[in-house]
Image (cartoon, helix red, strand yellow):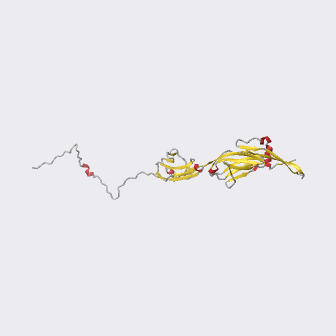
Amino acid sequence: MARRLLGPDNANYQDSLSDSQLNQPDSPQGRHTGGLWGRRHSGTDERGNEGSAIQEKCYAPRFLQIPPDLTVEEGRFCRIDFKIGGLPTPDVCWYLDGKAIRPDDYHKMLVCEKGMHSFIIEIVTVHHAGVYECVARNRAGESKFTMRLEVLAQEALRPPTFVQKMLNSRALEGDTVRLECKVDASPPPQLFWKKDKDMLRIDPNRMSLYEDGSGRQCLLIERLMKSDAGWYTLSAINEAGMSTCNARLDVGTRTAPAMKTAPPGSKTLKLLSSLSHVPVLSAESPAQHTAPPVRE
């Protein structure tokens, strides 16, 4: 008596499972109905003798690998992998909230080797969120599992945007200057400061980075030096994107005040030494002098 099996992969699956194992229930996420199923029919054996019986065995589908619940960002690629055994090869159908999913440009169903299957969503939208049910069927029965797909709406992810940009500044040596800007993003971005395209080296004795009460990102530089002059760039990065903002800082040389000089053509008043003998009259000590005699 000859035995015919459908497919080498399913033959391996048959040999690895006993009849009692096939009738065991699936995991809580999956349900399995059916088991070993066979039939006898007349046919022709290898020697061409008619009337010999051929027994065909079928095994109900059984999920050997079930995907977990997933959370995917809107606009991303999503691939759901699972593994199934059964003889003959089961047909697989997907449902979203009870509605059948048809393969199209955005939904693809792939069959790989050794019972591996993949369900692909090329571009995830908020409409893909919900409860998915995968059903596998063949002549011996069916099996199914469910999973949930959550989609993070794109509105919840905002790339960094500078709502207040840095302004070019000019100061003198020894002054204090503050470069500031304000960025909006969700989730909060990572911030990187650069000076002339190189990562900014913070001098803790003169420089500090902080966020003020209004949410502005600030770079404070005290006791300015000529070497502080240059282009300053702030880069903000999160999962949704990246943005940059830059400004120029010029540092001038502080000079001492110039001596005042007389305008051209002016005359200088000099004290005459001959006046040095002029007596000084004081109200406290009136000068004593002799009146000239009166002639009669």
Q: Visible in this render: residue 233?
A: no
Spot occupied by residue 47 in the image (x, y as percentages of width and height):
90, 52
Q: Nearer the viewer, residue 49 or 251?
A: 49
Spot occupied by residue 186 in the image (x, y as percentages of width and height):
57, 48
Q: Is residue 153 left or right of residue 265?
A: right
Q: Nearer the viewer, residue 201 or 215?
A: 215
Q: Residue at 27% of width from left, 51% of height from top?
A: 273
Q: Nearer the viewer, residue 234 or 174?
A: 234
Instruction: Please identify the residue farthest to the bottom as the structure is shown.
Output: 265
Tally of numbered discs: 0
Instruction: Please identify the residue farthest to the left as the structure is shown.
Output: 296
Q: Is residue 256 left or right of residue 7?
A: left
Q: Is residue 43 left or right of residue 92?
A: right
Spot occupied by residue 251 in the image (x, y as percentages of width and height):
48, 52
Spot occupied by residue 7 in the image (x, y as percentages of width and height):
80, 50
Q: Residue at 71% of width from left, 52% of height from top?
A: 109
Q: Visible in this render: residue 52?
A: yes
Q: Nearer the viewer, residue 139 or 254?
A: 139
In the figure, residue 68 lies in which quadrant?
top right
